[in-house]
Image: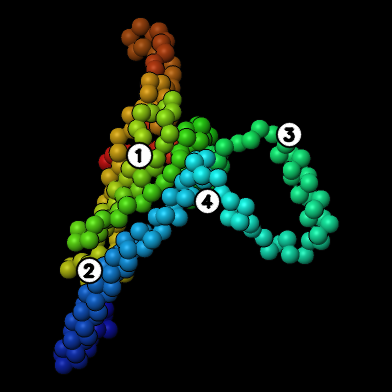
Amino acid sequence: MADIDNLPRVVKRRVNALKNLQVKCAQIEAKFYEEVHDLERKYAVLYQPLFDKQFEIINAIYEPTEEECEWKPDEEDEISEELKEKAKIEDEKKDEEKEDPKGIPEFWLIVFKNVDLLSDMVQEHDEPILKHLKDIEVKFSDAGQPMSFVLELHFEPNEYFTNEVLTKTYRMRSEPDDSDPFSFDGPVIMGCTGCQIDWKKGKNVTLKTIKKKQKHKGRGTVCTVTKTVSNDSFFNFFCPS
């Protein structure tokens, strides 16, 4: 900035012209991101039938055909036919020994535990609850509405809370800030709102009860004080504020 301050006045005028051009570029870029959001909304509709079938397979509503189940991982390319057949027989034998599970049990919990960002959020006491998670959806704001999206987690009936759906809404800004237009680098999340989880009695994993011994100042006696404090949990993600 010091270099610009030392420029001749006539050059500073030209720099101002460049700044105005940059602001116009940012405005065009904002329009670009708005159209990207429109495309996301458009393609969400095209993806939906695939997501619907995914939901049905995971939750044992639909059994995929043999053709749909065909998959040949790259690492199998060099395995001999004899070994493949042997592996197939072993797999079939194991399947016979086990009960036939429905759908894909604990699918979303397995996903969460294998995604670094999510696995760091999931505590051991969250896992029994996430076994009841049956679907995740993203809903985009309607055309002409301020840019936003809602993350929805759908749960089957469970012993932990009465909500069927937990939501978190993200509000976004897609245009440059008038006070700092040169920092614009695409849409930014301006705020988010979670939801209230209606926990069943004694099942709220976001809180824990601790006991602490406390000495009475006057009498010198010691008593045990019970206190409820916040607890690390994936479900803090939905904190309403």
Q: How crowded is mark 2: few (under 14 residues within 10 Å), some or many (20 or more)?
A: many
* Residue 77 horizontal side relative to residue 207, left or right: right
The secondary element bearing badge 2 is classed as: loop
**Among the two numbered marks 3 and 4 on one chain, the one whose residue lies closer to the N terminus:** 3
Residue in the foreground of this view, choosing between 212 and 189? 189
Do the residues under discs 2 and 3 have CB atoms within 8 angstroms? no
Residue at mark 3: 97
In the rendered view, would you say 104 is above or below 69?
Answer: above
Tell me the residue that label 4 is attached to.
Answer: 116
Q: Is residue 78 above or below residue 62?
A: below
Q: Residue at position x 36%, y 59% from top?
A: 44
Q: What amino acid type is highlighted by mark number 4?
A: Asp
User: Which residue shows up at 45% across the image and 38% down it?
Assistant: 133
185 or 160: nearer the eye?
160
Cα distance between the residues tagged 2 and 3: 62 Å
* Residue labelled with disc 1: 166
- Mark 3 lies on a secondary structure that is helix
Q: Which mark is residue 145?
A: none
User: What residue would you read off at disc 2?
Assistant: 176
Residue 241: quadrant of the picture: top left
Name the residue type under label 2.
Answer: Pro
Mark nearest the camera among 3 and 1 is 3
